[in-house]
Amino acid sequence: MMIKNNDKFRQRRPGDMQRELSSRCISGRPFQHVSGSGVADDAVRPSVEGSSVDPVRLEPAGFPDEVFDYTALARQGLPAAGGKPAVVAIIGAGASGLLAAMELLRAGHYPVVFEASERIGGRLYTVREFDDPKVYAEMGSMRVPPVHRTLMHYLDLFNIPTRRFPNPNNVKTCYYINGKKEFGSPDNQLPWVEALLNRWEAAILPFAERMQALWNDPEARTNEWAKIRERYGRMSFRDFLKDQSWTIDEIELFAAVGFGVGGYGPLYGISFLEILRINLCRWDDDQREIVGGNDLLAHGLHEHKVKARDGEFYSLKDLGLVNTFTPVTHIDRDDEGRLLLSTRQGDTFLADAVIVTAQTSAIQMELNIRRDLLNHKQWRAIWNSHHMSSGKIFLETTTAFWKEPGSEITTTISDLPIRGTYLFDFEDTDGGLICISYTWEDDSRKWHASDIEERAEKSIEMLEEIYGVNSIRPHVVTAYGFSWEEMPGYRGAFRQYYPDQHHYYEALAQPSNNIWFAGDGVSYAAGWIEGALRSGLRAANEIAIKFQL
Ligand SMILES: Cc1cc2nc3c(=O)[nH]c(=O)nc-3n(C[C@H](O)[C@H](O)[C@H](O)COP(=O)(O)OP(=O)(O)OC[C@H]3O[C@@H](n4cnc5c(N)ncnc54)[C@H](O)[C@@H]3O)c2cc1C
C-alpha cells in the first residue's frame, strides 16, 4: 500500500522522532442561534415512608472492581522506553486519548493522535460561542466529585481550579412534580424528599456495610464485589427497586427526583451495578465544576510540557502530535504485522500499536477495523454495548437575574420534558446561562424532532409554567441545543451497561493484535471523566510495558 506524506508531519521534532514519524506517514455546527414565555398547581403526591438512615462512607481509595492505584502511576510516569520507541497511533483527542499520548511522550515513545473533528476534547466540550465572550456552556461533562483522584491529580498539575457545582440538593432546589412547586435545601429538606432519600439509603446500606468491612483489603474487596456482581449483574435498576418491594408510586417519584444528578427514571433500564457503584463510592456527593470550562483539561493535556528523549521539555502541541480533521476510517495490518491506519482523506499511517478511544457506537458505524484483528467477544462488545442518549438546551441571559432579591428561580427538577434545570453565573461578567434542560434516554430523544428554535420555545414555556409568564423570556439572548446521539463520532452520550453486559468490559480491556481500546466505555466509571482518564492510562501503561525494549 502506498504511503504518502502530509505537511503536518514536516515539522521540527527532536531526536529520531521526526525521521521515525515521517517514515510512517501519509499526508484530513451542531447548534444555531435563536432570539429568546406558563402555571399549574396542587396535585396529589404519593406518600413515601422511610426513616432516617446514616449512610456508610467508604474511603474511596479505589473502585470496588479494581485495586490499581492510577494516581501513583500518574505521579511516577509509565515505564521508560528503551532504545526503540514505539510509534503509537491514538484515535480520538478526548480525555483518554490526550492523556495516553501525553504520558507516552513523557515515557519516551512517539504518540500521534488522530482526531476526526475540528477540535480537541471530545466530550470535554465547552462552547464559547455566546454573545458574551465570558459566558460558556458545557455540552458534555459538567460536574465532578473530589473523590475522582486521577482527574484531581491532572487538574492540580495544570493549576485548574474547581468550585461548588449548583447540584440539586447541594443548593436550594425547586421540585415541580405533578404540577406542584416546592422548594428544599440541604439544611431544610422537603419531608417527602427526605423520606425518599432515606428509603434509598436503606436499600443500599447492606451493600455499603458488606463492602465497608473489607474495603481496605483490596483482594477481599474485589472478591466481595465479584459476588455482588454475580448476584445483581443480571438485574436492572428497576428490577432492584421492585425486589426491594418499592411501590409503583415510589418508583415513579424516584424516577422524577432521583438524587444528586437529577431524575433516575432514564436509568431504570440499565444494570443495577452501574448505579450501585456510583452510590457506594458516593460519586454523586459534593459535586464540583471546573472553573473556566471542562475543555481546560484537554488543553492542559495538550499543552503540558514533559521531558522528551532528548532531555528537553515539549508538549504534544509543541510537537504537532495531535491532528484534528483526521477521521480514521480503516485499521488494517501490513505483511510485517504493523497496523495500517487510513483516514477519510485517503492518507495512511503505520503504527506499532493503536489505541482506539472512539465510543463503540461510533466505531461500529464509522471505523472499519479488519475483522480478524479483533476476537468475537470484542466484536459483540462493539456491536451491543449500551450508550445513554443525552441532550442539553442552554439559554444565554443578559444577567444572572435569578440572583436578584426576591427571585425564586433556582436549580429545578421537574417531571416536565425539560427535567433538570441548572443556573450558572461567571466571573468578570453580569451575563448568565441557564441549562434549561438536561435530559437522558427517552427524555432526550423526544427533543429530536424539534429544531433549536422549537427546543428553545418549548423549554422556555415549560420553565415559565413553573415560575410564571415572562419570568424567563425577557432575559434570553441566545439559545443552543445539542444531542450527543445525533453526533457523528459519538452516536450516544456515555456508556451505561444493560444487565448482563458487564463482560463486554473484560473483552475490550484486553488488547488484540496490538490494538488497545480505551475511553469512557472501557472503564468502571463510564459517564465520568475519571473513567476515561484511567482507561487512557491503563492502555498507555500496557503499551509502555510491552514496548519497553
Ligand atoms: C452529556 C454528558 C454529560 C456528562 N457529564 C459528566 C459529568 O458531569 N462528569 C464527568 O466526570 N463526566 C461526564 N461525562 C463523561 C465524560 O465527558 C466522558 O467520560 C469523557 O469526556 C470521555 O472521554 P473519552 O476520551 O473517553 O472520549 P471522547 O471525549 O468521546 O473522545 C473520543 C474522541 O474520538 C474522536 N473520534 C471518534 N471517531 C473517530 C475516528 N474514526 N477517527 C478519529 N477520531 C475519532 C471523537 O471526535 C472524540 O473527540 C458526560 C458526558 C456526556 C456526553
Image (cartoon, rainbow, N blue to C red):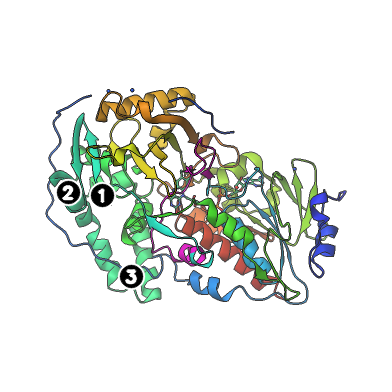
- Give the residue displayed 48% in from the left and 52% down from the top: 292
Name the element at disc 2. loop
Q: Which residue is mark 1?
A: 169
CB atoms of marks 3 and 1 within 8 Å: no
Q: Which residue is mark 2?
A: 189
Q: Which residue is mark 3?
A: 59
C-alpha gap between disc 2 and disc 3: 26 Å
The label nearer to you, 3 versus 1, is: 1
- Give the residue displayed 49% in from the left and 63% down from the top: 155
Which of 225 and 456 lies nearest the eye of the viewer?
Answer: 456
- In the rendered structure, which segment of residues is drawn in magenta? 126-155
| Circle 2 crowding by C-alpha within 10 Å: few under 14, some 14–19, many from 20 | some
Question: At which x and y percent is residue 350?
Answer: 79, 56
Residue type, label 2: Gln
CB atoms of marks 2 and 1 within 8 Å: yes
Which of 171 and 386 lies nearest the eye of the viewer?
Answer: 171
C-alpha gap between disc 2 and disc 1: 8 Å
Question: At which x and y percent is residue 306?
Answer: 65, 69
- Give the residue displayed 41% in from the left and 34% down from the top: 398
| Circle 3 crowding by C-alpha within 10 Å: few under 14, some 14–19, many from 20 | few
Beta carbon at label 2 within 8 Å of ligand 1: no
Sequence-first tag of 2 and 1: 1
| Circle 1 crowding by C-alpha within 10 Å: few under 14, some 14–19, many from 20 | many
Question: At which x and y percent is residue 461?
Answer: 33, 24
